[in-house]
Amino acid sequence: MFKNKTLGFDKVMTNFNKKQKILFIFCIIIFFVFLLLWLFYRPVKNLDNQTLEPPIGFLTNISSKTLTENIIKKNDKGYTTSFSDIFSSQVWLNNQQTDFFWDYSMTALIFEPNYELQLKGDCQANQQKCQSIDNFILPEKVCSTNNGCLELFEDNLKYNGQQLNLPEKGEIINLAFALFNNRWLISGVKKISDQQYQPLAWWFNNGDFQLVELPNNELILTKHPGRLAIGVSKESALVLYSAYEGRAWQINNQEIRDLGHLFGIRVNNGGFWPKIISSGDGKSTNWYVFDQSGSDLVFLKFWQNGTSWIEGGVSLTQYLPKGSRAAYFFPTKNEKELLIKIVNNSRQSKLWSFLDLGFKKEGVHQVTSINLTDHDQNKREIIGAVIRKVEGGLSGFTDQWSLSANGLDWSPVNLGQELYFASSSDKIFWRYQIKASSDNFSSPFIKMITLHSFIL
């Protein structure tokens, strides 16, 4: 019934000659190209739904009356551009004006680690110490006077010699446990399917289980189930889940915080079997992590910056001796020293000492960006900016953020404070300066910065 009907476009084309058809199609193509360019380069609306009208006193900082009128008119529309740096590389940093240490694995900026690494000799000459390290790696049974004995046997738990059944239905694998605040903290990986796993944790006390509500504990899509580890200090517990995607949580009393930003894809490197050592007490606690299976060379450190919560982390793997194949760690009476059994590529085992000296720092340190519009093909007139958000740990420091329209003249700002320049520019820079504290074991940890620029 539709045979005799002709579509409108076909009808028009039949009335065109060959040249007209080509010209018509060319015009259509040009129209869509301009449409795509407009969509790509159009100004972005202010994401915070805030008006960008200049604050009181703004007009006194403007050298051009015409510019002032344009700013007020355009700002009523709330146009901004947004920039974020997650420090996966140093491409946006001015390395000549930056003396922070960039950690590739953590994708973060910190003070440079300070340490001493000393060879103690072969394990044949230090058999007792090397054997102590071996015994520390995989404890199968832990006993407490008030809490009985918990034992891991062939991926099953026994409590005081009897089979302990977990409250969760389904297959629970890769169990881990630790005694914390007179309660057992038990964790395991629930297998949902061959490519779906979920880390879980429970409190266990006097025969009763209580599920631990781990924040952001959604299902993880991976072919590898991953491994769990629990480390404890007198005040905190640290739970790590290592797979292709890592998860991390710290428990203080009844509060649990998600520390996944400290345990990302690069740190896990496909997944390893973590073992956690805590050193020190209270707000001065340091945490060390290594691979207890020996399959991967891993050495991580986390610190708290004088607070109750872990604020930063660094991968120290690169500082282990060249040719190392596996490294196993053991705490000593000196809370700043760890013994290490290192197996090299020739499968020879040697005993080393790692003395943690904190961080190298003196005076004022800084991070400076390059011009953030260097790679912007569509240069816009920037009239101001705001550092909207910074992720990381910066507790206990005297510091200052600054913005600049030329990389030479700097204006100090607080986080979230809008700054308007004396004249418009097509450039924007940020800088962070920090005074080193007296605590050698504290360091800033800058994970991400988000900056909004106000444009004409």
Image (tube, rainbow, N blue to C red):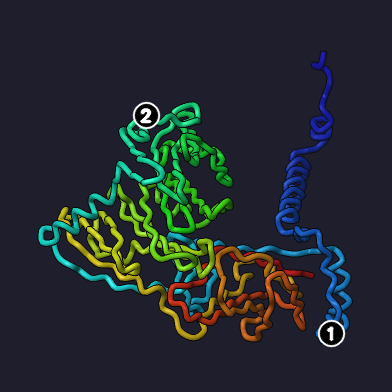
Judging by the rendered image, the residue that carries numbered circle 2 is 163
Is there any visible trace of residue 268 in the rendered image?
yes
Residue 114 x/y as whole percent: 37, 74
**In this rendering, would 200 be left or right of 255?**
left
Vertical placement of 74 versus 405: above or below? above
Q: Earlier in the sequence, mark 1 or mark 2?
A: 1
Q: Identify which residue is drawn at 29% across, 46% down.
A: 138
- The residue at the point 72 percent across, 51 percent down is 36
Q: Element at badge 1?
A: loop
Which of the image's four quarters has the C terminus?
bottom right
Circle 1 sits on which residue? 64
In this view, the residue farthest toward the front is 146
Disc 1 marks which amino acid?
Ser
**Viewer-nearest of discs 1 and 2:** 2
Tell me if I can see residue 260 in this picture.
no
The percent position of residue 91, horizontal first and vertical second, equals 51, 68
Left or right, residue 442 beside residue 417: left
Between 406 and 340, the one lying in front of the other is 340
Q: Measuring from the top left, give residue 160's x and y in whole percent.
A: 35, 35
